[in-house]
Image (cartoon, rainbow, N blue to C red):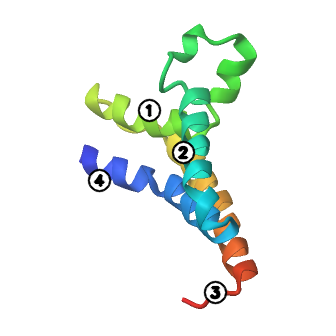
Amino acid sequence: MLMLLLWIGSLPFTMLGIANGYQLSSQTTNVTNIVCNLALALVGGLWFPITEFPGWMASVAKWTPGYRFGELGWNTTDGEAPSMTGIAVLVVWLLIFGAYAAHAYRRSGRKA
């Protein structure tokens, strides 16, 4: 169950990577994807607990895909069901990054 949740939860990050691949040159895509994922992990509390963040940053962290992706694993390993808020936040990020990917694909002029 945990593997399935984490696989599904990774879809927003996959869409971001695909979008960057269509939008950017092959030389900058890898670096950009690394920076984006590191930033989302850092702001999302995957490196440091959000309880150590300033109040405003902890509030922002709860709306990031990094935090909600981590929450899927934390809740499941604690024997709890994934939070509906967390799933909703991940779906919203999936839609945002999916729209970015679709836009980047159309702009690239590539054919599937």
**Mark 3 or mark 4, which is nearer the start of the sequence?**
4
Q: Position of residue 59 (x, y in %)?
A: 69, 23
Mark number for residue 71? 1
Q: CA distance from mark 4 to mark 3?
A: 31 Å
**Could you say which is closer to the camera, residue 14 or residue 94?**
14
Query: Which residue position holds label 3?
Result: 110
Q: Position of residue 77 (x, y in %)?
A: 27, 30
Q: Secondary structure at mark 2?
A: helix
Q: Is residue 106 visible?
A: yes
Which is closer to the viewer, label 1 or label 2? 2
Q: Is label 3 in contact with label 1 (beta carbons under 8 Å)?
A: no
Q: Secondary structure at mark 1?
A: helix
**Mark 1 or mark 3, which is nearer the start of the sequence?**
1
Q: Residue furthest bottom?
A: 111
Q: Bin the neighbour count of mark 1 within 10 Å (Cα to Cα): few under 14, some 14-19, many 20 and up.
A: many
Q: Bin the neighbour count of mark 3 within 10 Å (Cα to Cα): few under 14, some 14-19, many 20 and up.
A: few
Give amino acid for label 2. Ile
Compared with residue 55, is residue 20 higher up or lower down, i.e. above or below? below
**Could you say which is closer to the camera, residue 99 or residue 109?**
109
Compared with residue 37, is residue 112 higher up or lower down, i.e. above or below? below
Q: Is residue 82 left or right of residue 78?
A: right
Q: CA distance from mark 1 to mark 4?
A: 14 Å
Residue 39 placement: quadrant? top right
Q: Secondary structure at mark 3?
A: loop
Query: Which residue position holds label 2?
Result: 34
Q: Residue at x 63, y 87 (%)?
A: 110
**Mark 4 or mark 1, which is nearer the start of the sequence?**
4
Q: Is label 2 in contact with label 3 (beta carbons under 8 Å)?
A: no
Q: Is residue 99 visible?
A: no
Q: CA distance from mark 2 to mark 3?
A: 24 Å
Q: CA distance from mark 3 to mark 1?
A: 36 Å
Query: Which residue position holds label 4?
Result: 4
